[in-house]
Image (cartoon, rainbow, N blue to C red):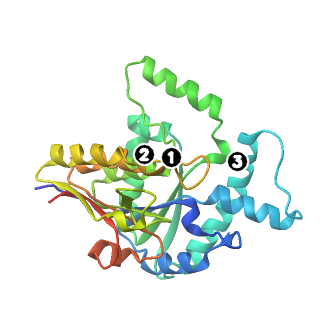
Amino acid sequence: MARFDYEIVGKIGSMALIRKEDNDIDYNIFSRIGAQLRPGIIWVSSGATEIGRLDYMKRNDSRELIGDIEEAKADYSAQGQAILMKNYREFISHKYSVRQLLVEHQHFNDPEKREYVRRFLMRCAAQNAVPIVNYNDPVSFEENRQLELRSFKESGLDPVECVDNDETSAVITLLVRARYMLVLTSVDGIYADPSDPSTLVSEISGKNEDEVIANIREHQKSCVGASRAGANGARAKLEFTIEPVRIGTIVLIANAKYGIDDVIKGNCPRTRIGIR
């Protein structure tokens, strides 16, 4: 039987935190999620870059930053991180501490750094704290990142790239051996036909890990598109479920409009991925 050291690693996508109709933060989502975050949950949150972009535009007559795209992303992210954490702190119960962890690919590719991150996350649970994790975009220079990753590959390693927070949440799930990996998005889960909402796949399962993974591969064939520029979409979400499934983790993909506990208990539409 699999042994788990953490209950839940959850991840929410950028667009799930935004009200599309008026390009603003969806405070109802923050409120709903924050009310259920507690020690024993690690929360990987996207959204800093998009929230920072919207905040910048509000303060600059709806103008966006111009110039280098990577620099603009770094600037937006730095501006959005403060807002992101302010909202989590506001809505998470004040009897819990809230801790921010900003990571980059090298934190998972270096054994000592990886272990340091693991110990930090384990202390959070023991110390009544909820860790909020995000990729450290303000100091991540893409050209340098690619050079570092190439060096790892030339050394014969298969490095963690942290291309987005879907991968980050999967890596952390493996690191702390989480019972559940929860992925909240702007849709209800994985669809057999992405153009038809009635084709929600409620379960991708099998009698063992190999059978589950074979079924994941089959469902990847129907995955197209993504919710925004720069996102990797459902195909990547499914790819990053494979290693967690190997250790016995149950992966749940659902809409952010539903509560964490409802998704875990199956009280709402979702896609469940794992051994039967």
Q: Amino acid at mark 3?
A: Lys
Query: Under tag 1, what secondary structure?
Result: loop
Q: Looking at the rendering, which quadrant does residue 253 occupy?
A: bottom left
Residue in front for this viewpoint, 195 or 213: 195
Q: Residue at the spot x=33%, y=50% of the render?
A: 241
Can you tell which of label 2 and label 3 is closer to the viewer?
Answer: 2
Residue in front for this viewpoint, 93 or 134: 134
Residue in front for this viewpoint, 191 or 61: 191
Residue occupied by mark 1: 232
* Alpha-carbon span between mark 1 and mark 3: 17 Å
Label placed on residue 236:
2
Q: Which percent across, then down, holds residue 44? A: 47, 59
Q: Earlier in the sequence, mark 1 or mark 3?
A: 3
Q: Looking at the rendering, which quadrant does residue 77 occupy?
A: bottom right
Q: Which percent across, then down, holds residue 250? A: 25, 59
Can you tell which of label 1 and label 3 is closer to the viewer?
Answer: 1
Q: Which percent across, then down, holds residue 180? A: 29, 62
Asked if 223 appears above or below 185 in the picture, the reply is above
Residue 243 visible in the current orientation: no
Residue occupied by mark 3: 73
Query: Under tag 2, what secondary structure?
Result: helix
Relative to 96, 71 lies left or right: right
How many residues crowd around disc 3 within 10 Å: few (fewer than 14), some, or many (20 or more)?
many
Q: Which percent across, then down, holds residue 221? A: 35, 43
